[in-house]
Image: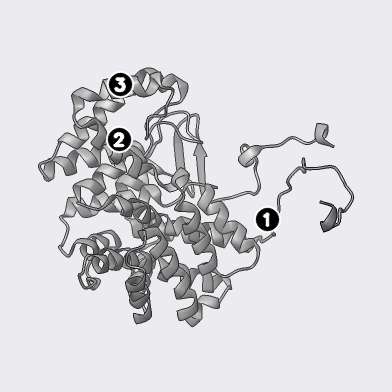
Amino acid sequence: MTDTVKINRGLKGVYFERSGISDIDGRAGMLTYRGYSIHDLATRATFEEVCYLLVHGELPDAVQLAGFDAALKAGRQLPGAVHDIIRACAEGHPMDVLRTAVSALAALEPDSQDASEAGFVRNGIRLTAQVPMIVAAHEAIRNGRAPVEPDQSLSHAANWLWMLKGEKPSADAARLADVDFILHAEHGSNASSFAARVTVGTEANLHGAMVSALSTLAGPAHGGAAEDVMKMVHEIGSPDKAAAYVAAKRAAKEAVTGFGHRVYRAEDPRARHMREGVRKLGEEMGEPGWYEILQAVVEAMKPYARHGLNVNVDFYSGVIYQLHGIPMDLYVPIFAIGRMPGWLAQCLEQRRGNILIRPLTLYDGAAPRDWVALADR
């Protein structure tokens, strides 16, 4: 039996399902959502349009977009009990608080138990609106402030910055947050999306699947790269020290954070849009030094690009958050805010052709043996 079974650890290279949501060409460095290039979406679309595209399969017309935006804004409300839960967990890590609050919403909102397709869509849109509210409310509460009420005149991304910081963002800052969410919205069968699909495969409700996704994203091997890059940038300190830092890491056979990807062998196609955003935001806020350190690291890493060690999207994300004064422990929750429509699309797709996901493990433990009584052990 052992000789005839091929083990693909981590399910690497295994196709478990067909999907029409996103397509990743790792060798060419290409990514599409529903057939649309990530480059077109990042430069021409809004996050609301991308949400609609991922959930419904087509870009919305003006009427459809207005209706979707209205539904998203209508979801900007939390039961009072959620704020009580956040206060009780205020000292916890933001991802633990977010996961706990989403789980609580399953019990607090009766509609959460509707596992029909229409129920998934309604709950998914509402959760997409609520997740940034939870993150912003926790940040306020743990710092002794009252949560900022949402502003219905603002877009999803601009409202997020408003609730987090209590001040209206500039048009450029809001657009950069919008692009950040677009770039993180969907990425195939990554660990958190797969976890969500496994949960839906058991016929669980959407809130349960989102809790699974959040729990999986919280692991540093999946969602922690942006935070690690920012720690690296602080450690380097100035552009002139980047080359020595990279040389020391390579000599020690240690990874340089923000380079390489499980799927991409070429540069992550999302990275270029964050790179330009960091440069502009740094100039706007009078702090170009962070961008200069990043680019010095990129230059030092160029000799290793032939080995597939190219820059990925998370290399630039952390500096954007740093420029906004956002604490590092919020970087993964921000990832979750952007990924909500992708998780919803994955859950809907799983539900439509549902099958219990139940892979096998090859047993390599002890051979069959006889029971030994307790007195004889």
Please, what secondary structure does the residue beneath circle 2 have? helix
Query: In this view of the protein, which residue sits in the foreground, 117 or 332?
Result: 332
Determine whether 338 is above or below 317 in the image: below
Q: What residue would you read off at disc 3? A: 300
Viewer-closest of 35 and 173: 173
Residue that extends furthest to the left in the rendered view of this protein: 286
Alpha carbon separation for disc pair 1 and 2: 38 Å
Residue placed most toward the observer, 178 or 78: 78
Mark 1 — residue? 357
Residue 148: x and y in percent read 22, 71
Amino acid, disc 1: Ile
Q: Please tell me which residue is depicted at 37% across the width and 31% down the height of the picture.
A: 311
Q: Earlier in the sequence, mark 1 or mark 3?
A: 3
The residues bearing labels 2 and 3 have C-alpha atoms spaced at a distance of 14 Å
The structure residue drawn at horizontal position 37% and vertical position 29%, both measured from the top left corner, is: 256
Rendered residue at 49%/78% (across/down) = 107
Name the amino acid, label 3: Ala
The amino acid sitting under disc 2 is Met
Q: What residue did someone put label 2 on?
A: 232
216, above or below 317, in the image: below
Find residue 93 and report its horizontal and vertical position in percent. Answer: 36, 59
Q: Name which of mark 2 and mark 3 comes first in the sequence.
A: 2
- Tell whether label 2 touches label 1 (CB within 8 Å): no
In the rendered image, the residue lying farthest to the front is 375
Q: Which mark is residue 83?
A: none
Question: Residue 298 lies in what quarter of the image?
Answer: top left
Q: Is residue 224 left or right of residue 324?
A: right
The 10 Å Cα crowd at callout 2, few under 14, some 14 to 19, many 20 or more, is: some
